[in-house]
Amino acid sequence: MAYTSRKYGNNVFETAEGKFDGKNEWLRWKFLQQAEREGRIRNLRRQVEFELIPKQEHTEVRHLKTKDKIVTVFDEHPVRYMADFVYEKRRAGFNHVSLFAQTEQGDAVVKDSAVEWWTVVVEDFKGVPTDAYILKRKMMLFLKGIKIREVKKPTEEI
């Protein structure tokens, strides 16, 4: 494990599992991994990218000596948000539904069954929110309907 300096006053924390934006973010990763092992969450991923605005480009005609050529010209880079962690969390409680099963004689039988519901959580471990982050957070909610969960402590409950 090693530290290297980075902008915004935080340090990159390098481990065998990759680079983290500080030791507390790494500790959060370890906490979430334990929660996944316990079955409280599933599909844990880190550094998940969301494209908010695609790259901007246009086409134009270039007049060459012997022919005209249509070319694509780059205007702007895409705007992306990189989530620290994404996982699925079990919703509180179960929804009971009745399922119909058919017997060998063709009779319909009602069976009660519990259905688990899972919700996707996009999480960002935040110290001080930057202006760029705040704008991307608002874009995630407006464009994608995703509210980012901001976490400040490594062991904050899920």
Image (cartoon, helix red, strand yellow):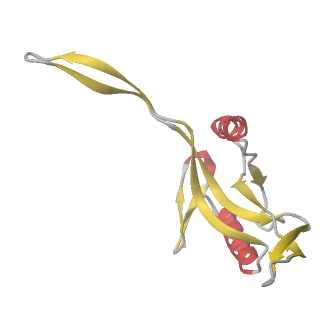
Q: Is residue 26 visible?
A: no
Q: Residue at x 73, y 77 (%)?
A: 34
Nearer the observer, 45 or 10 = 45
The part of the image, by quadrant, that contains residue 21 is bottom right
- Give percent across and percent down for residue 60: 30, 18
Q: Residue furthest bottom?
A: 104
Image quadrant where one finds the C terminus: bottom right
Q: Residue at x 71, y 35 (%)?
A: 142
* Image side of residue 16 versus residue 36, left or right: left
- Give percent across and percent down for residue 64: 13, 17
Check the image and report above or below for 7 versus 72.
below
Instruction: Count numbered badges in the picture.
Output: 0
- Give percent across and percent down for residue 134: 70, 38
Nearer the observer, 144 or 18 = 144
Q: Residue at x 73, y 39 (%)?
A: 141
The part of the image, by quadrant, that contains residue 135 is top right
Q: Is residue 6 visible?
A: yes
Check the image and report above or below for 22 versus 15.
above
Image quadrant where one finds the N terminus: bottom right
* Image side of residue 41 versus residue 76, left or right: right
- Give percent across and percent down for residue 36: 72, 75
Q: Residue at x 7, y 17 (%)?
A: 66
Q: Residue furthest left?
A: 66
Nearer the observer, 35 or 62 = 62
